[in-house]
Structure formats: structure tokens, C-alpha cells
Image: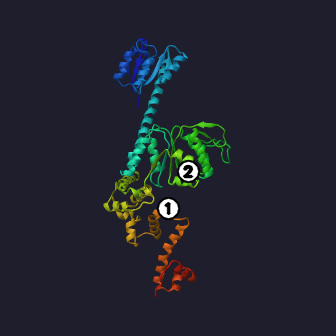
Amino acid sequence: MPLNRILVADDEESIRWVLSKALKQKGFSVDLAHDGRQALELIKDNCYDLAILDIKMPGITGLDLLDKVREMNNDLLVVIMTAEASMKNAVEAMKRGAYDYITKPFDLDVIDAIIEKVARARDIAGQVTTLKQELKDRYQAEKNIVGNSSAMQDVYKTIGKVAVSDVTILIQGESGTGKELVARAVHFNSERLGKPFVAINCAAIPRDLLESELFGSEKGAFTGAGERKQGKFEQANHGTLFLDEIGDMPLDLQAKILRVLQEQEVTRIGGNQNFSVDVRIVAATNQALVEKVRQKEFREDLYYRLNVVPIMLAPLRERRDDIPDLASYFLSRSCTEMSVVPKRLTDDAVALLKAYSWPGNVRELENAIKRAVILSNDPLLTAQDFGGLIPAKELQQSGTQDTSLEDLVDLKLRSCMNGIEGLDKGDIHAMVLEQVERPLIRLVLEKCRWNQVKAADVLGINRNTLRKKISELNIEMKRG
């Protein structure tokens, strides 16, 4: 935002002449006004980068003109000139929004310094404006959170409703569903845009370090604390603090988080001074916090304090219609980031991606696309480029897929876990072992023509153990 056009308003012709000559010599375009009314009309009809206004002029004073500029929501920077170097004039000018003020008589070096200062300020303002727009473009929900399913439409609506307020938000969803993206979308569409967005994963930091990470510490507060350290709350002041995986936070820290939410104050470890903080909290978890509250593993009062506005993110398997759009988005972004020729997904590749269960959700899909982009030299990505993905339907129809036994078992187990809530404690391990052991022992016995000695040898277990398992698993013996 270069400084080009300047307005000078003063009822003294000599002042107007001196300033006009000095500024034009430096290459600026200068307009002159002999009173406040003329200056106001010029401001309405033209676009200036800077206005230098005398504080006392006929008709409209410089301070009143400054008020009108602010009412016009004009980005115009205003410098006030005054012949009375009183504290009252200086305070009043700055209070009304003047960028700076100078006293008469002044040296032209003072004007040069003011111009240089204004130019720097406009340059910084331009950078900030650009950065804000870049951040908004990058993180606004409609560009980064891809999907047109009804579940995602509900998420978009909620983001739009809560972004402009400061209510606390709790985002719930499985790992890889994009909880941090939603948190960022809330922040970068709010009035806190341009202020810090600070994220911390409560599950990734050891309990002994988590407290100091959140609240900071004074020098000497504990072994290794060689200097004062700001915590995440202080770093996020006037911005947003994203508490990821808050369900893993220890109970004693939960109490301290609750106090910060209530008092809007933090105290560093080893310190006795409270610091006021203005922080919006967005929390996230992949756990059922209601169940953790019931089991006394999460504070009920903190849960209700966090869950002012809940946002539920559906797993990818429940919004399969979004997979083609997501895949195309990740494919385009991956090709750009890796500087490779743009690639396209074939219909069979899209069909495979839609059929897969995606236990790792959107993050797993993104990684699968990146892997295919790296490994394939062809501009068309086919189903063969995603050979490690086994659709659940095909798995049920055939056990001859070209993948590891562990992957097959993992996928099958995931499809069987929908009813896990109804199992009693201790049931799951026995159930899985029984369902794996029975077909394994039956198959080995069949291959050994029902010879238990040979079968025990192949299995690597004692013959008596094999007999016991045949009985426990109700395996029907046949003659070889």
C-alpha cells in the first residue's frame, strides 16, 4: 500500500505553500484546502492516503473533521497540526483516532519523519490485510472442509452461526475426521482473525509437562526451568486456544482449566501473580465424554462448560458420497505440492475408494492419495494404484485378496465392532480368539486328514492342548 496522495488543510496560506512544495519535491500528489468544509468535500470526492489537518480552521475544525473521517469508515490516516503544544490537544487528537500530531512551528525534517512513519504503517497494514485474506482463503470452511453431504452441511451451518460469537465449542469425532480443520475454520471466520490460533494435543504431552505447556512457568519453578516460559493460554491471548484430545487430560488439570474458563485468569507454575487472558476455547475429542463423565474420568462441570455448542463430525464411512470430492481435492493439492503433472482418478479407482471402510477417516484417504501420486508415473490413477485397500463387500465374498492376514483380520474386526457397546467386560478377547482359533484348527485338521498328532505338530501345540481346544470349540471331528 504505497503512500501517493496527500491532502493538506490549513487556513494559513504560508503553511499550505511550504508543505505542498516540500511534499511535491518528494514525488507526492498534493491537494490543498483552506478550511474544514473544503477539506471534507475533497475527502468525499477523492481517495487520499494521508491528510495533514490544522486543529483550528473556519467552519469545521480539524478534530471535527477527524470525527467525520472516522464516521465514513475511511482508512485515511490523519495527522493533526496545532500551534498550541498542550497536553489537552495531544490527548484529544489521539483519542479521536489521529495517527499522529505535530506542533507549529515545525521543521521540515519532522514532516519527513512523519511521512516515513506513515509509509511504514501503510506497508505493514497492507501486509496484514494480505495475510488476513490468505489465512481466510486457506482456512474458510467452504474451501478446506470438503463435502456436500447432509452431515457436512450441518457442520457448515453451525460454523457460520458460532464463528462470530465467543461461545465455547466442543468438536467430537473419530481420529482423522478433521476436528482441527473445523476449529481453524471457526477461528479464521471470527472476529479474532489476525489474532493467535494456538493448538495443543493434550494426549501427546506427558502429564508432568502438560501443565507447564498450558499455564507457563516461572524461572526455577521446577528442575530444568531455566527461564520464564509463557503457556499456551498466554500465547493465545485475544485469539483461540484449541484443546485437542481433551478427553485424555488428567482430572487435576481439568479443574485448573475450569478455573481459567470461569475467572479468565492464569497463574504460571511457581508464580503467584494472576494474568488476565481473553481466549476463546475450542475443544475436541475422539472419546465419548458422556461415558467418561459417568465413569468419573472427566469432570461433569467442565464437560457442560465446554459443550456449549457441540459439533459432531461423522466418520467418512457414513458420508461416502463425499469421497469423490475429497479424493479430487487431495489429488489436486498433492500434485501441486509435489510439483508433478496433474493426475486423474479413473472410475474404478473412485469405486474402490467409495467401497473401502476408511477406519482412519479423511486423514487415511489423504495419505492414500499422496501414496498413489508418489508411486504412480501414470497420469491416470486406477484401482491398482490403491491395491492395499480392501472393500468390505469383496472381503465378505472372497478371502483370496492380495493383502496380509493382519490387514484382513483388522478390516473384518472393524466391521464386527458395531455392537461392542452391548458386550460385557472380558467378552471381546474371548470372542475374537474363539472365532479365529476355530477355523484355524479346523483347517489344519482337515489338511492333516484329521490326524491330531500331525495337526498338533503343525500348530506347534501339545496334543492334549489340541484335544482340549477341539472340545471347547465344538469342532466336529471327521475321519481322514
Residue at image coords 57%, 40%: 262
Q: Is residue 290 visible?
A: yes
Q: Give me the disc on residue 289.
A: none
Residue at image coords 44%, 23%: 78
The quadrant of the picture occupied by the N terminus is top left
- The image shows residue 196 at horizontal and vertical percentages of 50, 40
The answer to whether residue 427 is above or below residue 158 is: below
| Residue topped by disc 1 | 421
| Residue topped by disc 2 | 202
- The image shows residue 90 at horizontal and vertical percentages of 52, 19
Q: Is residue 138 visible?
A: no
The answer to whether residue 422 is above or below residue 19 is: below
Q: In terms of secondary structure, where does tag 1 sit? A: helix
Residue mark closest to the camera, 1 vs 2: 1
Number of dots carrying numbers: 2
Q: Quick one: which residue is furthest to the left in this view?
A: 347
Q: Residues within 10 Å of mark 2 (few under 14, many from 20)?
A: many
